[in-house]
Image: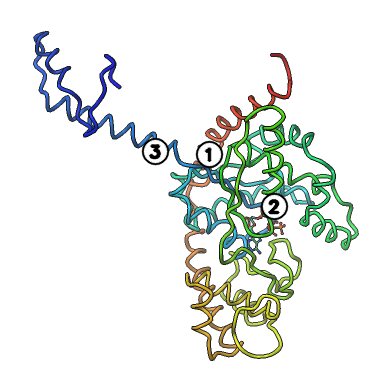
Amino acid sequence: MRADGGVFKNDGAATNAPACEAAENGYNVNVDVWRAVAKRLELDLRSEIGKTMKKRLLTGLQPSGVLTIGNYCGGIKQVVNYQNDYETFLFVPDMHAITVPQDPELLHRRIREVVGMYLACGVSPDENHIYIQSEVPQHANLSWILECTAYMGEMSRMTQFKAKSEEQEKKKKEIGCGLFTYPILMAADILLYNAHVVPTGADQKQHVELARNLAQRFNAKYGETFVVPEPLIPTVGAKIRDLQAPEKKMSKSCENPKASIFLTDTEKEARKKIMSAVTDSGEGVYFDEANKPGVSNLLTIYSVFKGITIPDAEKHFENARYGDLKKEVAEVVCSFLAELQDKFAETMKSGIVDETLDRGRDYARQIAEETYDKARRLVGFGRV
Ligand code: AQP
C-alpha cells in the first residue's frame, strides 16, 4: 500500500497517479522510474511475506558424545532435506546432555563440534537459526510451567527414561531427576518457537507426543498459546540399529566401541566395525526387521547413504552373500565419512561456528521471549 492509501495493480505496476500529481506540482518525474520502484517494492514485500509465512521446523542433537550415523540419518539429514521448505530452528541441547554425567571441558568442546557437524553435513548457516539451548534462558523457564502441567503417570511411560535409567542402574550409578523430567524440557524447546514439525528418529516420537499433549492441555486451560507440533519421521533411517545388538538403536553414548559408527571414525575404523557387524542366521539379503534385524539394518544404511529405496537395495543384493553386503555398505559409508570429515575440518578452522551461534542466539531469544512472556502472564506469574 502506498502512503496515500492507493494500491498497486496485480501486475506489480503502480497506477500512474503519483507521476501525474508530481507533474502537476512541477516535479520532473519519469513514470517508468515510479513503476520500477513500485515493482521492486512489491517483490521485496512478497519475499518477506513468503519467508515469514513458512512453517517452522525444530530439532536438536545432544552433545553427549560424538554423533553417529544414526544421528545423521534420523536428525541432521532431515534438516538438510527440509531447510528450504521451513523456517528452521536447530539447536544444541546442552541442558539435556547433563541428564547423565558429563565432563565440563569435553561438553564445551562437543557443543562447538556438533555445530561444526551440522554445517559440514550441509545445514546452511544463512537459512537456519542455529543456537545453544542454555544461551536462551526461556527454555528452563517454560519448562517449569510445563512441568506443573504434566502428570507423573504420563512421564513414567517414557520408554527412553526406562532404557536410560536401566543403563545407569547397571553401572551402579544414581538416576538423576533430570533424566525423568527431560522430555518436559524437550516440550519447552519445541513449544517456545511454536514449531509445526519436529524431524526425529523413531526413538523420540513419544517425546513429541508428550509435547503435543502438554500444548493441548495448556491451550485448553489458558487459551490458544502454543502450536501443536507434529513429528516428522523419515521413511527410511528412522532407526539405525546397534551393529552388535541390532535389537537396540545405535547410540552415541553406547559403551561397546564396535556398536556405533561415529561421524569422526577413520575409514579403517568404520570399515572394521561394518565388517564385524552381527548378521543373522540363514542366507539371503532381504529386508525383514523381525527375523533379520542385522541384515535389515545394513540394507537400511546402504539405502540411506546411496540415496535409493529399500526395494532397490534388495534388488541390488539379490544374489549376494552377507560378506558382499558388508563390503558395499562399508564402501558407501566410508566415502560419505571421508568427504564429511574434510568439510568438518575446514569448518572448525574458520570462524563460522561462533558467528552462526551468536546470530542464532539473538534471533532465538527474541522469539522465545515473546512466547514465554505470553505463557507466564496467562498462568499468573509476576505483576499484571
Ligand atoms: N539410531 C538412530 N537412528 C535414527 N535416528 C536416531 N537418532 C538418535 N539415534 C538414532 C535421532 O538423532 C536425533 C538426535 O538425538 P539426540 O542426540 O538428541 O538424542 P538420542 O536420541 O538420545 O541420541 P543418542 O545417539 O542415542 O544419544 P545418547 O546416547 O546420548 O542418548 C534425534 O532426532 C533422534 O531421533
Q: Is residue 193 left or right of residue 279?
A: left
What residue do we see at 83% from left, 50% from top?
A: 156
Q: How crowded is mark 2: few (under 14 residues within 10 Å), some or many (20 or more)?
A: few
Where's ligand 1: which quadrant?
bottom right
Residue at the spot of label 1: 360
Work out how far the residue at label 2 is from the one at label 3, CA to CA, in angstroms. Answer: 41 Å
Q: Which three-letter amino acid code belongs to the residue tagged 1?
A: Gly
| Residue at position x 53%, y 39% in the image | 360
* Residue positioned 51% across, 78% down in the render: 313
Q: Name the residue under label 3.
A: 50
Disc 3 or disc 1, which is closer to the eye? 3
Distance Cα–Cα, label 2 vs label 1: 22 Å
In the picture as drawn, the residue positioned furthest to the front comes out as 220
Disc 1 secondary structure class: helix
Horizontal and vertical percent for residue 284?
61, 88
Nearer to me, 336 or 58:
58
